[in-house]
Image: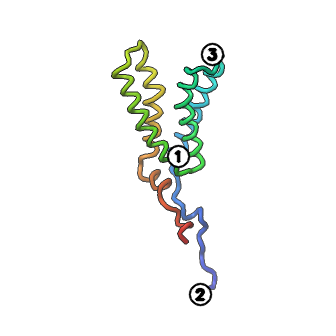
């Protein structure tokens, strides 16, 4: 028997993040960047309407970046934001009567919420973000 024993590296002990989490993070970053570029190019200024639209976009950008860097706060913020987006989308569908409001609700609230929930709620993704790293326990 040799004196050398296998010592796993800390990265080998951490659970792997599924590929679909990275895809949804890239989708969130891409969509948020697209909306940000479109609003800035309209040259309407940085009035109250701009900040009203950009606050959810800023949250989506933060979640996307956090998921890419495997941060635990991104998982928590993503699931909480999804619940808030779904509630806001339903509120707008039920109580706001504007001509194309259903399209705004679908594109701005419900689709990002569904993308976030679909990638963050499966067990592999939950364990990858919420399980304590065994490297910290050794």
In the depicted structure, whether residue 6 falls above or below residue 49:
below
Look at 44% across and 35% down and name the residue there: 113
- Find disc 2 in the rendering and name its residue: 1
Q: Residues within 10 Å of mark 2 (few under 14, many from 20)?
A: few
Look at 52% across and 48% down and name the residue there: 73
Look at 57% across and 34% down and name the residue there: 58
For discs 1 and 3, the disc positioned in front in the rendered view: 3
Horizontally, residue 24 falls left or right of residue 45, namely left
SS at circle 3: loop
Quarter of the image for residue 38 reads top right
Mark-to-mark CA distance, 1 and 2 = 46 Å
Q: Position of residue 79 (x, y in %)?
A: 44, 43
Residues at circles 1 and 3 in contact by the CB criterion of under 8 Å: no
In the depicted structure, whether residue 136 falls above or below residue 28:
below
Q: Position of residue 40 (x, y in %)?
A: 65, 22
Quarter of the image for residue 42 reads top right
Mark-to-mark CA distance, 2 and 3 = 74 Å
Image label count: 3
Q: Residues within 10 Å of mark 1 (few under 14, many from 20)?
A: many
SS at circle 2: loop
- Find disc 1 in the rendering and name its residue: 74
Which residue is the extreme one toward the top? 99
For marks 1 and 3, the one nearer the N-term is 3
Which residue is the extreme one toward the front? 48
- Find disc 3 in the rendering and name its residue: 44
């Amino acid at each position: 028997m040799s004196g050398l024993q296998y010592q796993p590296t800390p990265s080998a002990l951490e659970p792997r993040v599924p590929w679909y989490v990275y895809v949804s993070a890239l989708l969130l970053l891409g969509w948020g960047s697209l909306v940000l570029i479109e609003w800035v190019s309209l040259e309407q200024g940085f009035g109250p309407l701009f900040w009203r639209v950009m606050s959810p976009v800023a949250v989506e950008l933060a979640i996307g970046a956090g998921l890419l860097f495997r941060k635990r706060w991104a998982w928590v913020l993503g699931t909480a934001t999804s619940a808030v987006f779904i509630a806001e989308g339903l509120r707008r569908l039920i109580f706001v009567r504007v001509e194309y409001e259903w399209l705004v609700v679908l594109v701005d609230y419900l689709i990002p919420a569904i993308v976030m929930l679909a990638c963050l709620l499966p067990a592999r993704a939950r364990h990858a973000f919420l399980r304590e790293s065994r490297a910290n326990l050794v």
